[in-house]
């Protein structure tokens, strides 16, 4: 994980997402961790084409020291880019409030997904709507801090 400049990621988002990232980063998580009634983290993946770190704000849940995020892409037919990045290279960095962690990300097993879906839909009820509007099974990602 040392060959990546984790401290200088690209923020390819625009509009409210870019504003959210900037607020989160400039306040060291004091503002931005809690958003629209739920909690968010910043996930940095490595671009599978560019090889550069890319940062994305995501709603998260927790389970026994692990972080959970949903690859919903708003119910689109394709997985979000950040998910495709981490399936190609599972080494990631997360910022949760003021804390940053190197981590390994993986897709939840079918059993884990069944158990975690209600937890994540509790954080963001629209996930049920997103799943209903797409034919793909929306993955849940388990992020385990290392070190």
Image (cartoon, rainbow, N blue to C red):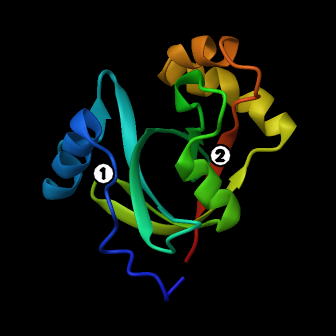
Between discs 2 and 1, the one toward the N terminus = 1
The picture places residue 132, in percent across and down from the top left corner, at 68, 11
Q: Residue at coordinates 58% horizontally, 72% vertically from top-left? A: 146
Query: Can you say whether 40 is above or below 6 in the image?
Result: above
**Residue 127's x, y, as percent?**
57, 20
Q: Quadrant of residue 94?
A: bottom left
Q: Where, quadrant-wise, is the N terminus in this rendering?
A: bottom right
Q: Nearer the viewer, residue 115 or 138?
A: 138
Element carrying mark 2: strand
Q: Tell me which residue sits at (29%, 30%) in the image.
A: 35
Quarter in which the C terminus is drawn: bottom right
Q: Residues within 10 Å of mark 1 (few under 14, many from 20)?
A: many
Which mark lies nearer to you, 2 or 1?
2
Labelled pair 2, 1 in contact (Cβ < 8 Å): no
Q: Residues within 10 Å of mark 2 (few under 14, many from 20)?
A: many
Instruction: Relative to 129, say whether 114 is above or below.
Output: below
Q: Is residue 101 left or right of residue 31?
A: right
Residue 93 point in image, percent of width and height: 46, 65
Q: Nearer the viewer, residue 47 or 22?
A: 47
Q: CA distance from mark 2 to mark 1?
A: 19 Å
Which residue is label 2 attached to?
141
The reply, left or right, for residue 3 in relation to residue 33 is right
Kindly identify the residue that appears in the image at 49 percent across and 38 percent down.
Answer: 60
- SS for callout 1: loop
In this view, the residue in front, 90 or 102, is 90
Q: Residue furthest front?
A: 49
Mark number displayed over residue 97: 1
Residue for point 58% across, 43% down: 68
- The answer to whether residue 97 is above or below residue 74 is below
């Amino acid at each position: 994980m040392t060959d990546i400049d984790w401290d200088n990621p690209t923020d390819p988002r625009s509009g409210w997402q870019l504003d959210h990232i900037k607020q989160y980063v400039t306040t060291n998580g004091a503002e931005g961790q809690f958003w629209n009634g739920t909690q968010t983290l910043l996930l940095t993946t490595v671009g599978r084409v560019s090889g550069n770190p890319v940062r994305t704000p995501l709603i998260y849940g927790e389970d026994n020291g692990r972080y959970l995020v949903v690859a919903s892409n708003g119910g689109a037919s394709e997985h979000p880019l950040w998910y495709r990045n981490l399936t190609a290279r599972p080494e990631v960095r997360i910022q949760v409030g003021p804390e940053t962690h190197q981590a390994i990300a993986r897709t939840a097993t079918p059993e884990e997904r069944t158990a975690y879906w209600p937890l994540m839909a509790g954080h963001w009820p629209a996930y049920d709507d997103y799943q209903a509007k797409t034919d793909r099974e929306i993955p849940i990602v388990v992020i385990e801090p290392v070190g």
